[in-house]
């Protein structure tokens, strides 16, 4: 490597035209268009579904007026495509000549040459046009939002916190920018033919739902999707059609990341998505509010439970320092927000101790500037330490100082200013972490052939081996330091002990050790009672029944009530009212006055057509003590009284009057033949023993 | 007692007796008690009390004042003091005449006072009685005063100190009452115990039969102390009487006070009285080993194995108990548990061990840590079993470390649960690494050694390893590398250690770049030790120089953490001594060397922390001693450059190390110190020492004397001592040169002495005029260095420790308090 300032890093024009000099031509030499350049040939995109690189989308469909909850819907977003770097595929598989233009081979792997395509969220289970509400837990799991909101007939509302929306927009903007920079006329489709696909080598043959894959959305669709989002703050209570109340809580994972409480008056369900108990930049996780849950739905645990984030940061720093000290460059494929803030903070503390003060750090992303600036303004969403800095006033993140001292420089792309400032050895943070598009592709090409350089993978979403596959053979060192701050199983165990939900619901994968480490019994959820698990596309009935509803009583009606204390602390009152139900809210209103008989001619309005209220009879309560009752009867002149015990109570037999009084727990019957006077007399005697109200 | 103290004593007693004058400091009272103890041990207590009636007055006054008016501290002090005086029988009688002792220690005394609720008073009461219980009269007093009964109840006191002291006093009383009876053990059979002893024994017996665990524990504690302290024949009779009761405890489920029971058995077994007799002890121990839980049996097994006279069968059983957890681990992870026969005993009770290991994570971790620590303790002892299952132990340590790493995939369900319990457990990892380190000395097969190095490398490499685990892993690695007695030159033989080195260095490189300073520090220490041992081996040198390690070590000289800088200095010093410095591409070896001296001098002169500067001073001394090439090139320049820096250093250790450097330099220029063994074979010196006058002149030019004289009056005693030794050495060496001194030239000496006196007075800023050899010689002769040496040998607080000073201190403290009170108005 030539130290010092050089011109723009050069990308080779093609395999045959690769220059010996490792410098890129200046911007002006790249005109007029970028198409046709080797590094722009972004081909797409298959998916390896075996690897658990899933993003959990929270989709809560709510259908008014009857509440139905089907959740969680775990959606799998596959954001990655493959880069063609090799030869045509058909010589090895002559029978596939029809799709030979689409398939390319590199170092023994077959790739699809296409515009990158994306696997959409599951739509077969739910008709998205019937979904009323979507809750977004964090900015990483909203990348498919335009696909849901734009072409499915979705008319509902989306709820998310402000940082989630702003940083989510940045991530989408970066994605769109990366894809649009390298336009390609057609998507590969022939290989998707099932007859061909099943004959392709793995992993292509295992890719699912390939027919549903779509090209990337546009910025217009992004803006339209984002306009449907309603901003919410932590602990804010949002009424959904009166049926449930939804509250976002800090989850400690990312700026504005949320867990959700979904509760009615008598039931509480907590939805725990990507959460972290580590001390990183976001506001700490709110555990207290999750207590007393009937059901806790647990998703978004760490993808790499064996990798301790602290150890990984140590690895990251050590390997970075080793490379740079040897005169090599370090490439960090990453998202423009999230862990990068913590990495920059670690480096801020580390670079002086490691003697790296003179090494430039470059952050290259179309949204680099916005990301760094946004992080500094969301003070209320940050951890306490960073919040308190704002009042000093100091920038919460130390990357401000790195920028001020010119140690960290950020650029929208490798073109323009970057080409003037570029010095080696250096450290570059850029996307996309899949290595299929974005500026990272340039640096892989530029630095891949030297063993002095290192690429350090920090994002846990992608298999680094898969990401690197199209770049083989590769001389540069590869280090895998996945930094996933989300909950691991030990932390989950502590959390559940603290929160003590009645039931835990989680994906099936969390209830058994990972397939590759079947002996690690510690890498699974261990709680009592055992968690309920669900599989893909499974609909679960949550283990609780709704028994009660809350009903409001109008004040004027409440005024008219006359409660009677029947036991200490318990009073009863009879209510005659009209139950009015709207938006799942129940209100007791005073009954309408009886219709005036004089206005018989006037046509009644439909709404006035309420049932006439009958004259109210008093309600009775209490029990009749048989012995005393008999005594009373005797006092009133009845003789020849016989009492019989029955299964449900007693029968008092007035033999002389041929009358029978049947006393049971909840009823009393006086049976006498056509002697109304006697019956009324007896009734009055019975009533003396009962309370009326 | 010295008259000045006697003069101060009445005032002191008055202060103590005055409730309004609180003595703020407990330690003063403790020091006073120590002093009184020294005084009474040296002479008659009775005479002391008669000459200083204020002391008895104090005790009487305390008793008269009633305790609510006396501070608990003074009350406790008075009780201890009375006990100290009453330790002599005549003084005891004297105090008894006035019923003073009964008032202080009897049932009507403190036991009934409100102050009894304060633990310090109860403690003072016990300490007083402990001092007092030295003679037959005291024994009668104890029996009559009801003190023994009070002690029984104090065994269960809420204060652990009081409870323990009560228990120990009971043992003391028992031993005292048995003192005359020790001769004939047969006479003790039956009920021939003295009354006091009988009472205690009866109480212990009753407690042993009790169903309450605390009572049993108290009884066992008394017996443990008894057998630990008293080695007279009567203890055998006592065990004969109580042993069956102790054995009976084992029939309970669960066994009460198991830990105390273990202590008792070991205490009895260690007693020389039982060296030849069996008394059912071994049988009880064997039973206990088999019925205690694994974690309780561990300490008993270790204690049993440490015994000299234990039957072989019991030793085997005990060793089996210690090995059980490891065997269970090996079985659960489907490793063959060593050759058959060695561990036959371990099958018994293994289910209980498995249950413990699998019951919970904390139980598993606790048992394993305990077992590993016990075996580690046993390993270097001569008593360790002859058939030491080295292979099994190494295998077990390796598999435990793998379980902690999560890198072993056991097929059994037990193995899976063990893996779940141990994965990522730092405690067990540390214990296993310590244990593995100690196993390096045994003979291990090459195959197993490969496994050891593999697991050590895995631990060192793992990003999940915590700094403490890494430190232990480095230590264990070092031990295995050095103890495997395989120098790197055996590389061709394909032996593990050298092959391991090639894999180790990339890891070491990474650890030297760790963001955690503890890790960088551990890695540097490891490098230093390894280089010290293997620096001369060609293969090691090759691997080291091919790596980035020397370069990274150099860079760590500028580390922000001072500990790391210090370790880097030591490591670079060692690497440089062995010629293993990084050869920069741009500069030659010489420049690198010069650069290193310059870098170290820079640290010595400007580093704000003491540790790196100390390290530099040590490295320079080593370099001088070993005739490091850079130093040997121009030793005088080197000394002249270093001395001004170290002599003005604020850290006394740097200054002391500077004197050490001067000592080495002098030894090289003047020859070794004279008093050495005449029979020692010495190599002929390459160059004879230079003529003395010339050397002296050089030393003057290098300002060695300036440094040494200045250091003589250093405020830190070790520096002054070292300077004194150094000057004495010079005086000895320069004695033949005394002829240089001409009569009439003493005026120069006067000026030197004047300066030295000013330095002594603390005016260290005063410069010393340029010294000439003659002046130096005269000054050395005129100074009483021998006297200074003996004064410096005394501890720095010898003046302040006098009793007179103590008494003055107490009085002064009270006076200050009074002044403060006055100030308030």
Image: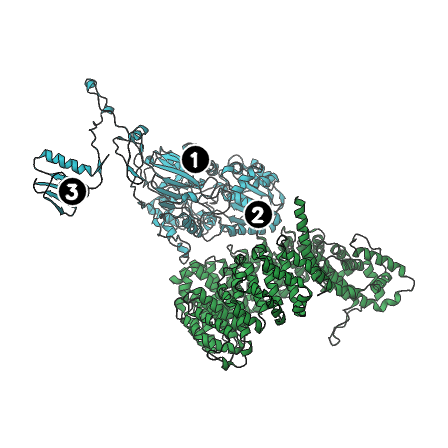
Chain colours: A cyan, B green
Categorize mark 1 by other alpha carbons within 10 Å: few (<14), some (14-19), many (20+).
Answer: some
Share a chain, discs 1 and 3?
Answer: yes
Q: Are marks 2 and 1 on the same chain?
A: yes
Tell me which chain the residue with mark 3 is part of.
Answer: A
Q: Is residue A297 above or below residue B685?
A: above
B581 or B372: nearer the viewer: B372
Label 3 in the same subunit as label 2: yes
Say what secondary structure mark 2 lies in. loop
How many numbered discs? Answer: 3
Q: Mark 1 against mark 3, which lies toward the viewer?
A: 3
Mark 3 and mark 1 in contact (Cβ < 8 Å)?
A: no
Q: Which corner quadrant of the image does residue A616 belong to? A: top left
Up the image or down, B668 lies above or below B73; here it is below
First of labels 2, 1 by sequence position: 1
Query: What residue is shown with label 1?
Result: A232
Q: Quadrant of the N terminus of chain B?
A: bottom right
Q: Is residue B62 above or below residue A593?
A: below
- Residue on which disc 2 sits: A329
Which of the chains bears the disc numbered 2? A
Q: Secondary structure at mark 3?
A: helix
Q: Nearer the viewer, residue A201 or A212?
A: A212
Q: Position of residue B251 (x, y in %)?
A: 39, 71
Residue at label 3? A631
């Amino acid at each position: 490597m030539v130290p010092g300032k050089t011109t723009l890093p050069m990308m080779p024009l093609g395999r045959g035209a690769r220059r010996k000099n490792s410098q890129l031509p200046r911007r002006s030499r790249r005109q007029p268009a970028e198409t046709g350049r080797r590094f722009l040939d972004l081909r797409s995109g298959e998916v390896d579904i075996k690897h658990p690189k899933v993003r959990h989308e929270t989709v809560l469909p709510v259908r008014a007026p009857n509440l139905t909850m089907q959740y969680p819907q775990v959606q799998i977003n596959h954001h990655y495509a493959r880069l063609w770097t090799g030869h045509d595929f058909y010589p090895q598989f002559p029978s596939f000549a029809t799709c030979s233009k689409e398939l390319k081979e590199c170092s023994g792997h077959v790739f699809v040459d296409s515009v990158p395509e994306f696997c959409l969220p599951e739509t077969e289970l739910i008709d998205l046009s019937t979904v009323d509400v979507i809750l977004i837990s964090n900015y990483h799991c909203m990348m498919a939002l335009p696909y849901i909101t734009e072409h499915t007939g979705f008319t509902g509302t989306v709820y998310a916190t402000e940082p989630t929306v702003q940083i989510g927009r940045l991530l989408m903007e970066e994605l769109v920018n990366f894809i649009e920079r390298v336009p390609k006329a057609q998507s590969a489709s022939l290989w998707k033919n099932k007859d061909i696909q099943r004959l392709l080598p793995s992993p292509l043959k295992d890719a699912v739902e390939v027919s549903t894959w779509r090209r990337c959305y546009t910025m217009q669709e992004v803006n339209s999707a984002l306009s449907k989002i309603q901003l919410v703050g932590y602990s804010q209570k949002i009424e959904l059609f009166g049926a449930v109340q939804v509250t976002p809580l800090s989850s400690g994972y990312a700026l504005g990341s949320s867990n959700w409480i979904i509760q009615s008056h008598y039931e509480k369900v907590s939805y725990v998505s990507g959460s972290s108990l580590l001390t990183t930049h976001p506001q700490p996780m709110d555990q207290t509010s999750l207590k007393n849950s009937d059901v806790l739905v647990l998703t978004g645990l760490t993808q790499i439970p064996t990798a301790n984030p602290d150890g990984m940061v140590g690895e990251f720093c050590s390997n970075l320092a080793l490379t740079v000290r040897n005169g090599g460059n370090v490439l960090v494929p990453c998202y423009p927000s999230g862990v990068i803030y913590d990495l920059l903070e670690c480096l801020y503390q580390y670079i002086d101790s490691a003697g790296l003060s003179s090494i430039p750090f470059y952050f290259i992303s179309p949204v680099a500037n916005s990301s760094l600036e946004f992080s500094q303004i969301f003070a209320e969403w940050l951890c306490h330490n960073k919040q308190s800095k704002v009042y000093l006033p100091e920038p919460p993140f130390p990357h401000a100082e790195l920028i001020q001292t010119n140690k960290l420089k950020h650029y929208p792309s490798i073109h323009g200013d970057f080409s003037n400032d570029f010095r080696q050895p250096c450290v570059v943070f850029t996307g996309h972490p899949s290595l299929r598009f974005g500026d990272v592709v340039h640096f892989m090409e530029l630095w891949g052939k030297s063993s002095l350089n290192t690429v350090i993978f920090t994002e846990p979403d992608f298999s680094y081996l898969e990401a690197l596959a199209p770049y083989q053979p590769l001389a540069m060192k590869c280090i895998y330091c996945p930094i996933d701050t989300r909950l691991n199983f030990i932390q989950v165990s502590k959390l559940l002990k603290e929160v003590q939900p009645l039931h835990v619901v989680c994906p099936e994968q969390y209830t058994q050790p990972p397939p590759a480490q079947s002996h690690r019994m510690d890498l699974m959820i261990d709680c009592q009672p055992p968690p309920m698990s669900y599989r893909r596309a499974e609909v679960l009935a949550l283990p609780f029944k709704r028994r009660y509803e809350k009903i409001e009583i109008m004040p004027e009606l409440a005024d008219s009530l006359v409660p009677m204390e029947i036991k200490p602390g318990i009073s009863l009152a009879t209510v005659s009212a009209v139950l009015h139900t709207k938006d799942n809210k129940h209100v007791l209103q005073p009954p309408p006055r009886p219709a005036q008989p004089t206005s018989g001619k006037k046509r009644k309005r439909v709404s006035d057509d309420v049932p006439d209220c009958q004259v109210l009879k008093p309600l009775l309560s209490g029990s009749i003590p048989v012995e005393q009752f008999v005594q009373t009867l005797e006092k009133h002149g009845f003789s020849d009284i016989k009492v019989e015990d029955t299964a449900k109570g007693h029968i008092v037999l007035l033999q002389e009057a041929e009358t029978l009084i049947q006393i049971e727990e909840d009823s009393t019957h006086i049976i006498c033949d056509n002697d109304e006077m006697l019956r009324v007399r007896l009734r009055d005697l019975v009533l003396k023993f009962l309370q009326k109200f | 007692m010295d008259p000045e103290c006697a003069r101060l004593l009445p005032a002191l007693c008055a202060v103590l007796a005055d409730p309004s004058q609180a003595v703020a400091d407990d330690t003063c009272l403790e020091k006073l008690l120590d002093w009184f103890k020294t005084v009474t041990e040296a002479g008659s207590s009775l005479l002391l009390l008669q000459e200083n009636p204020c002391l008895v007055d104090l005790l009487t006054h305390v008793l008269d004042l009633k305790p609510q008016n006396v501070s608990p501290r003074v009350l406790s002090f008075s009780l201890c003091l009375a006990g100290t005086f009453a330790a002599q029988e005549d003084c005891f009688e004297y105090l008894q005449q006035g019923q003073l002792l009964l008032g202080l220690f009897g049932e009507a005394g403190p036991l009934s006072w409100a102050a009894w609720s304060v633990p310090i008073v109860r403690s003072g009461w016990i300490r007083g009685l402990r001092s007092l219980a030295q003679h037959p009269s005291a024994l009668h007093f104890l029996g009559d005063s009801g003190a023994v009964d009070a002690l029984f109840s104090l065994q269960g006191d809420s204060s652990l100190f009081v409870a323990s002291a009560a228990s120990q006093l009971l043992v003391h009383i028992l031993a005292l009452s048995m003192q005359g009876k020790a001769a004939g053990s047969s006479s003790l059979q039956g009920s021939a115990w003295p009354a006091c002893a009988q009472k205690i024994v009866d109480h212990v017996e009753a407690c042993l039969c009790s169903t309450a665990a605390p009572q049993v524990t108290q009884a066992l504690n008394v017996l443990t102390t008894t057998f630990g302290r008293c080695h007279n024949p009567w203890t055998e009779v006592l065990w004969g009487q109580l042993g069956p009761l102790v054995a009976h405890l084992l029939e309970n489920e669960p066994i009460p006070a198991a830990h105390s029971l273990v202590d008792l058995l070991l205490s009895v077994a260690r007693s020389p009285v039982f060296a030849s007799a069996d008394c059912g002890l071994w049988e009880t121990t064997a039973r206990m080993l088999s019925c205690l839980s694994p974690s309780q049996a561990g300490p008993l097994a270790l204690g049993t194995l440490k015994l000299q006279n234990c039957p072989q069968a019991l030793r085997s059983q005990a060793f089996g108990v210690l090995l059980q957890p490891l065997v269970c681990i090996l079985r659960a992870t489907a490793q063959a548990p060593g050759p058959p026969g060695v561990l036959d005993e371990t099958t018994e009770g293994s289910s209980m061990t498995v249950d413990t290991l699998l019951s919970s994570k904390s139980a598993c971790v606790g048992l394993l840590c305990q077992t590993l620590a016990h075996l580690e303790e046993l390993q270097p002892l001569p008593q360790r079993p002859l058939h030491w299952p080295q292979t099994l132990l190494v295998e077990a340590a390796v598999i435990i470390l793998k379980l902690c790493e999560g890198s072993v995939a056991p097929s059994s369900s037990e193995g899976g649960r063990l893996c779940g319990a141990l994965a990522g457990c730092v405690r067990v990892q540390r214990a296993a690494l310590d244990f593995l380190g100690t196993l390096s000395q045994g003979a291990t097969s090459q195959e197993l050694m490969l496994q050891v190095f593999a697991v050590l490398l895995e631990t060192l490499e793992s990003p999940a390893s915590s700094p403490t685990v890494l430190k232990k892993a480095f230590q264990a690695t070092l031990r295995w590398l050095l103890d495997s007695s395989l120098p790197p030159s055996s590389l061709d033989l394909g032996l593990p250690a050298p092959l391991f080195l090639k894999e180790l260095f990339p890891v070491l490189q990474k650890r030297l770049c760790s963001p955690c300073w503890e890790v960088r520090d551990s890695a540097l220490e490891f490098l230093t030790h390894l280089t010290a041992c293997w620096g001369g081996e060609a293969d090691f040198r090759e691997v080291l120089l091919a790596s980035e390690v020397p370069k990274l070590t150099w860079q760590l000289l500028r580390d922000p953490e001072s500990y790391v800088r210090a370790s880097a200095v030591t490591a670079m010093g060692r690497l440089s001594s062995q010629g293993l410095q990084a050869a920069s591409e741009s500069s030659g070896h010489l420049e690198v060397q010069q650069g290193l001296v310059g870098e170290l001098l820079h640290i010595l002169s400007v580093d704000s922390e003491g540790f790196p500067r100390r390290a530099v001073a040590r490295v320079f001394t080593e370099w001088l001693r070993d005739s490091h090439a850079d130093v040997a090139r121009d030793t005088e320049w080197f000394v002249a450059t270093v001395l001004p820096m170290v002599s003005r250093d604020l850290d006394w250790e740097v200054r002391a190390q500077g004197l050490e450097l001067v000592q080495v330099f002098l030894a090289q220029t003047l020859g070794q110190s004279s008093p050495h063994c005449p029979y020692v074979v010495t190599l002929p010196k390459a160059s004879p020492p230079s003529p003395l006058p010339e050397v002296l002149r050089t030393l003057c030019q290098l300002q060695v004397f300036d440094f040494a004289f200045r250091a003589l009056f250093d405020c830190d005693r070790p520096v002054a001592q070292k300077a004194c030794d150094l000057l004495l050495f010079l005086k000895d060496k320069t004695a033949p040169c005394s002829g240089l001194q001409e009569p009439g030239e003493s005026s120069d000496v006067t000026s030197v002495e004047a300066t030295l006196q000013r330095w002594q007075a603390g005016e260290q800023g005063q410069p010393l005029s340029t010294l000439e050899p003659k002046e130096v010689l005269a000054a050395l002769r005129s100074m009483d260095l021998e006297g200074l040496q003996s004064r410096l040998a005394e501890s720095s607080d010898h003046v302040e420790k006098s009793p007179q000073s103590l008494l003055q201190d107490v009085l002064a403290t009270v006076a200050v308090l009074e002044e403060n009170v006055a100030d308030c108005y």
